[in-house]
Amino acid sequence: MSHRPWEESADFSIGLSPIDEARWLEGGEADPAARKDRLYAAHRDLVWGETAASRSGQAEVAALLGITDPAGLPPLYAAARTVADDLVLMEKSDGAWRVAAISLSAPTFFTAREVLGRSLAEIHGPVNGFSERFLVRLTRIFEGLRPGLILQRRNWSVVNSSETFTPFSAPVRARIGEISPGEAGQALFTRVERQTVRRLPQTGGVLFTIRVWLTPFSDLAQSPERLAAFAKAWRAAAPDFAAYKGFHLYADLVEAFLRAEGESHSVNGA
Ligand code: HEM
């Protein structure tokens, strides 16, 4: 699977497409438990949260991943530590789809404690234009998702950190000024989130998964086509998407990188 979604579709869209069960989670991490258990011990309220009523939904997720004995752990966490992906159990209560339990070891600037119990509308409040453009459709998808159907989407952003555990944007963004244009290939990363949703047929909830892929900018320069595809997406990013993702903070560095690698069209396409 390419971790360059900008090559396939314009972003900042719902962009959900069906995938086979065999392609549900991408794997590829030798020991997710080692990474996640450290965070679970040291930063519990940033990476983990559950509501009291969520245990049966959690147990269904654990069973889906083949875990019959959670060994004293909350079942969703017991499941999450066996896979590279973060797992979010969404359940409907008080008329809205809410985060009922969450294992979030690779957060892109949010925390388990701030989203636990929150509805799709509340969680996406900071995303420019989300409620007008996506909320009704998204709710309809959560309502209508039929058992057996697995949907996937990917988004992307640019960050100056190779860490997957980034609960807060401020300490990351505070270091942008330390990067010289010549270092951009190593210091900047594309951060791709691959997400999936599927129904939990027994308890009726929805399981949302998140997997983060970080790739240094230098990888974009591997071929002129790859570089051009990124440059096009970067420069075409819708203003609300770009503002929400903080692209303006990276603009000088990204443009310097693209120019240094021979991608010379200006931002205005001149
Ligand atoms: C299939 C379901 C979902 C869709 C289509 C969706 C869509 C989006 C979109 C379009 C954005 C803007 C950035 C981007 O392109 O990704 C976003 C941001 C976000 N989404 Fe979702 N979302 C979904 C489910 C969820 C769920 C279940 C959670 C629960 C943790 C969640 C948490 C977030 C957060 C925390 C942000 C960033 C908001 C912020 O900056 O505070 N999303 N989502």
Image (cartoon, grey):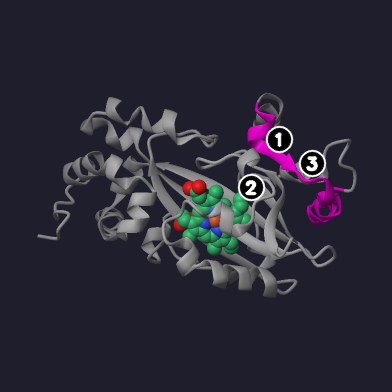
Q: Percent from the top left, x then y, of residue 31? A: 67, 36
Q: Residue at x 24, y 39 (%)?
A: 253
Magenta stretch secondary structure, dominant: helix
Q: Secondary structure at mark 1?
A: helix
Residue 170 seen from this side: yes
Query: Counting residues from the N terminus, which is met first, the one under dot 3 or under dot 2?
Result: 3
**Are discs 3 and 2 less than 8 Å apart at CB?**
no
Q: Percent from the top left, x then y, of residue 222? A: 31, 48
Instruction: Please give the residue where the numbered disc 2 appears in the rendered image.
Output: 85
Marks 1 and 3, how far apart at CA: 9 Å
Residue 26 seen from this side: no
Q: Residue at x 32, y 31 (%)?
A: 176
Instruction: Please give the residue where the numbered disc 1 appears in the rendered image.
Output: 33
Instruction: Please give the residue where the numbered disc 3 appears in the rendered image.
Output: 78
Q: Quadrant of residue 235?
A: bottom left
Amino acid type shown at disc 1: Ala
Judge depth for marks 1 and 3 and give the one in front: 3
